[in-house]
Image (spheres, rainbow, N blue to C red):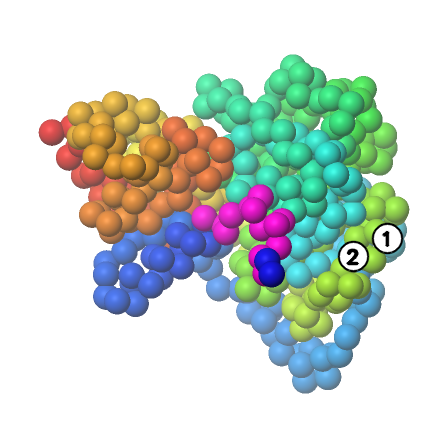
Amino acid sequence: MEWNARRLDVIEPSPTLAISAKAAELKKKGEDIVSFGAGEPDFETPAHIKEAAKKAIDKGQTRYTAVSGTVELRDAIITKFKRDNGLEYSRNQIIVGTGGKQVIYNFFLATLNPGDEVVIPAPYWVSYADIVRLAEGKAVIVPTTKADSFRISPAQLEKAITPKTKVVVLNSPSNPTGSAYSRKELEAIGEVILKHKVMVLSDDIYESIVFDGFQFSNLAMLSPELKELTFVANGVSKAYSMTGWRIGYGAGPLHIIQNMDTIQSQSTSNPSSISQAAAEAALTGDQACVGEMAKAFQKRRDLIVGLLNAIPGVEVNVPQGAFYVFPYLTGAYETDGFKKLQAASSETSKSKLFCAQLLDKYKVAAVPGIAFGDDNALRLSYAMGEEDIKKGVSRISEMVKDFSR
């Protein structure tokens, strides 16, 4: 008898979680590891949010809630969308899930039929393509370039859309590149979306972490017509440093939310009642903590970009948001040392080979770019202190210089 479900053949475990787990294991053994792998803020959850959770426990808010989330949290999300995005949603157009990943997963389960196509610009968050495949859809990957700041053009999107296309994924600011779309760029993309009447998954999880005065926009904010074609996924994990609380949320057309509610009712049911109380406090309370974290990330971004661009053979764009950089290693790959390493290895991915050597010999954990659809690069999260950033990049520089000797 075959015990393994065949659907597992189309997916792989998350490489970002695997890298983080390996780095943590090496640290426990006493290794001096600098880990650029984690996709989570290194700040504490703000005190007023933790206090709200404690009060919820004391009040006995420990029972099941509505599958889609408490009335209070959904109303807080409605207020957030109106306050921050100028968007109006009714309560039954909102769903709360156990993290943003579950919200995205349920969205695809609720919308895709076998063979439906989903356009995903690369580099992309590692889970998009695998979630689409689990939902029996087809991931259509559209490569973008460093020269275009890793943003898909309207012409590329137009070419990628076929009669089988159902959804286009937009993640701005992006994981792994930190690139973000301006309102003008979104308007041009929106014209293509309206022409073909396809849905958009707008993953806005890094909405509040933007730099240099960048003004965040999503397609739903541009017109009522685009709003009807957009499902917005967001959450409290990045903005409020609440990754472990596992609260994500989505907003969109009523029929999609209803179908997602049905799916969630037969899987996890409601998210944690205590985490929901904390998320409500996050969205309705003092928002100063959000800006403070963004300022700290901008300072770190400036530091890491400058240090990386000073390494011969390494080039990195300046991100508009999030807390990642996606340095290109084209020059480092061309060194004699790396070519010798490649010749002696059975590994065909350059970025996997680079990251394996980086961790084994130089004690730096990073995620290979191929995991995000681009083997030319690696992803570094700068959700860490400045001294660790300096130490880690110094070791990367040492490795590249050793390759050149």
Whether residue 298 is visible, yes or no, is no
Q: Quadrant of residue 355?
A: top left
Identify the image quadrant of the N terminus.
bottom right
Q: Is residue 137 magenta?
A: no
What stretch of residues is rendered in magenta?
3-15
The residue wearing badge 1 is 258
Which residue: 28% across, 27% down? 333
The C terminus lies in which quarter of the figure?
top left
Q: Position of residue 214 (x, y in %)?
A: 57, 33
What residue lies at 15% left-to-right and 35% top-to-bottom? 402
Name the side, left or right, on which 362 lies relative to 72: left
Q: Is residue 151 above or below residue 214?
A: above
- Which one is in front, 137 or 153? 137
> Residue at coordinates 66% horizontally, 34% vertically from top-left?
138
Image mark for residue 263: 2
- Measured Cα–Cα span from mark 1 to mark 2: 9 Å
Q: Kindly identify the amino acid type of the residue bearing the numbered disc 1.
A: Gln
Query: At x 30% / y 53%, what residue is drawn?
Result: 34
Decide: is 352 above or below 360: above
